[in-house]
Image (cartoon, coloured by chain):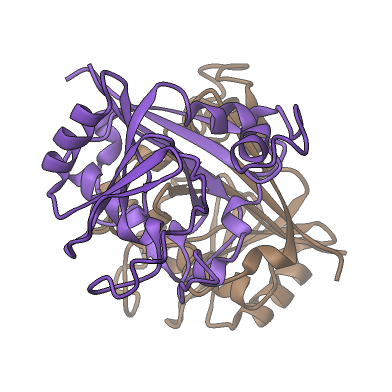
Chain colours: A brown, B purple
Amino acid sequence: MTKLRVHNLAVSIDGYATGEDRSLEAPFGHAGGRLMEWFFPTHTFVSTSGHETEAVGGGTYGVDDAFAAASWRGIGAEIMGRGKFGPQVGPWEDESWRGWWGDEPPFRTPVVVLTHHARPDLAVGETTFLFRALAPGDALALATDLAGGQDVRLGGGPTVVREFLRAGLVDLLHVVVVPVVLGRGVRLWDDLESLESQFDTEATSSPSGVTHHLWTRRAR
Amino acid sequence: MTKLRVHNLAVSIDGYATGEDRSLEAPFGHAGGRLMEWFFPTHTFVSTSGHETEAVGGGTYGVDDAFAAASWRGIGAEIMGRGKFGPQVGPWEDESWRGWWGDEPPFRTPVVVLTHHARPDLAVGETTFLFRALAPGDALALATDLAGGQDVRLGGGPTVVREFLRAGLVDLLHVVVVPVVLGRGVRLWDDLESLESQFDTEATSSPSGVTHHLWTRRAR
């Protein structure tokens, strides 16, 4: 049974998952790298960002890495919002730009990019991006087909995650609370009152200062 | 040097420190007891709520109690918003009602209650409530005088804590993040962008499911 899983979704202690003023140069807007500083030193990040050849076995193996690594286990497809692919809005005017992820995106699976603007499927390295205008349930059905019996990762951003949470489709939610007050941006938790009633929750603080919240959907 | 300390301030994971629709019967509004369930089993709560004679040595002694107990160490006075004394708004129409705290309030120190509406000082058991219309700095000066060399506790509610945080007056901030999504109420973190830059932070998760965040002001 395919699960829909969210991993490594960092939010500020005031609940913002990304800042304001996002751009090509600033994917997290005014938040900069502050939401992901716990992630960058991990072995998982170092080894999936193409640096493995420079530092085999490099990076940390603490609790932050343990949680980060789970994101890559047993995943056969990803669903992401258009903003995770790139900062453009409206019709695709420059299809030569192939996303934030370089020549070998770390996904290495089919990736369903949710957008109302048509664009041909795009293979980059071992990853294929499929641009689709789909409601959450339909996007999950497509991704489940593509996942070949493995799970589907819901990659964000926060607006997309919130839509899938509201639709009751998320089976695992891993949120990383970072002790910064962003003050503005895109909130994760809006319009989700009593969401916790659908989940078993646990929390694990890390020496890095962040806290990993793992919400697992109860048996239906 | 007197410190101003906030302890045991519980917020939902979406940042609300109290719910909507507060009343005499529902001090936390629609949140009910959900923000404080971690607190009620602790030895600190059991022994300061008048139950000590029924259960000497009762209650839990885990990490939740360790943090809860710190609230009572070395405190010589408290500052609280009017809403922590009682649910009334406007002029005091019924002075015979002496607050939510019973015949022996747990404070046992002077308590400065911030209100724009005059009312005579009120002694209840070993606690004296002083009703004053004071700006944060002036309230702290008064409470410091009353504290006799000990620290001052800032008892909340969240609007009051936020005012003192904005004024840069808080030396210790203990916030307990509870894994519930309240969805509405009074937010703690609004208008405090980059607050963390003034503090050293640490976080400790508890088996109860909450996470204790301790923010300690850096040397000025």
Residue A144 is left or right of residue A56, and the answer is right
Residue B218 is left or right of residue A199, and the answer is left
- Where, by quadrant of the figure, is residue A109 drawn? bottom right
Residue drawn 63% across the image and 34% down it: B64
Q: Is residue A44 visible?
A: no
Residue A12 is left or right of residue B190, and the answer is right
- Where, by quadrant of the figure, is residue B167 drawn? top left
Number of marks in the image? 0
| Near-viewer residue (B198 or B122) | B122
- The quarter of the image holding the N terminus of chain B is top left
Please provide percent x and percent y for residue B209.
67, 44
- The quarter of the image holding the C terminus of chain B is top left
Residue drawn 65% across the image and 37% down it: A67
Please provide percent x and percent y for residue B84.
39, 56
| Near-viewer residue (B146 or B171) | B146
| Near-viewer residue (A69 or B112) | B112
Please provide percent x and percent y for residue A59.
55, 20
Q: Is residue B22 visible?
A: yes
Residue drawn 63% across the image and 42% down it: B50
- Say above or below: B176 vs A207: below
- Say above or below: B220 vs A92: above
Please provide percent x and percent y for residue B44.
62, 33
